[in-house]
């Protein structure tokens, strides 16, 4: 089930509270089961949420990249509605 943009943003804020954004990686995908292991190998923590649209997923990704998270804009495919977040093991 898709989550609202506000809910995903709040989840990310809650999850990252007390840590620096630059310790986290954010991205979008259409296949989180495949993509997350590719990106994080064995992440310390992972979060996946399905947004209502790709536009919402891209907006969230861009905003958190602008705040200092790792990753890059422009990834995904036209059906990429999943936002993923992970923290790599130290």
Image (cartoon, rainbow, N blue to C red):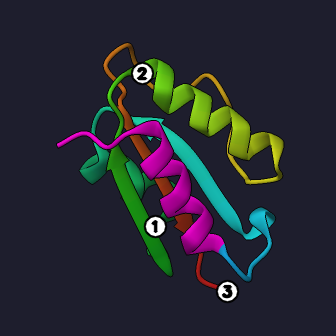
Q: Quadrant of residue 18?
A: bottom right
Residue 8 lies, with reference to residue 63, above or below; the image says: below
Distance between mark 3 and mark 1 Cα atoms: 12 Å
- Residue positioned 40% across, 55% down in the render: 36
| Dot 3 and dot 1 residues touching (CB under 8 Å) | no
Q: Which numbered disc, 1 or 2, marks the residue closer to the eye?
A: 2
Residue 27: % across, % down: 54, 42
- Residue at x-position 55% and y-position 27%: 58
Q: Residues within 10 Å of mark 2 (few under 14, many from 20)?
A: many
Task: Read off the magenta span.
Answer: 1-16
Residue at (49% x, 44% y) in the render = 6
Tag 1 near tag 2, CB within 8 Å: no
Q: Which residue is mark 2?
A: 54
Asked if residue 85 lies in the magenta stretch, the reply is no
Which of 38/87 is in front? Answer: 87
Separation of residues labelled 1 and 2 (CA atoms): 24 Å
Q: Quadrant of residue 17?
A: bottom right
Q: Counting other residues with Cα less than 10 Å from the Cα at mark 3, is it few (<14), some (14-19), or many (20 or more)?
A: few
Tag 2 or tag 3, which sits nearer the N-term? 2
Q: In what quadrant of the picture does the N terminus appear? A: top left
Q: Secondary structure at mark 2?
A: helix
Residue drawn at point x = 61 percent, y = 22 percent: 74
- For residue 65, the mark is none
Q: Earlier in the sequence, mark 1 or mark 2?
A: 1
Q: Which residue is mark 3?
A: 90
The image position of residue 79, as x and y in percent, is 31, 19
Residue 4 location (% of width, % of height): 38, 39
What is the secondary structure assignment of the residue under circle 1?
Answer: loop
Q: Measure the alpha-carbon separation of dots 3 and 2.
A: 31 Å
Name the residue beneath numbered marker 1. 41
């Amino acid at each position: 089930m898709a989550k609202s943009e506000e809910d995903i943003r709040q989840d990310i804020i809650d999850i990252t509270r007390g840590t620096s954004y630059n310790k986290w990686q954010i991205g979008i995908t259409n296949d989180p089961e495949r993509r997350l292991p590719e990106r994080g190998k064995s992440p310390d923590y992972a979060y996946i949420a399905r947004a209502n649209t790709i536009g919402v997923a891209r907006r969230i990704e861009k905003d958190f990249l602008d705040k200092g998270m790792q990753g890059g804009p422009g990834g995904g495919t036209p059906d990429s509605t999943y936002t993923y977040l992970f923290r790599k093991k130290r």
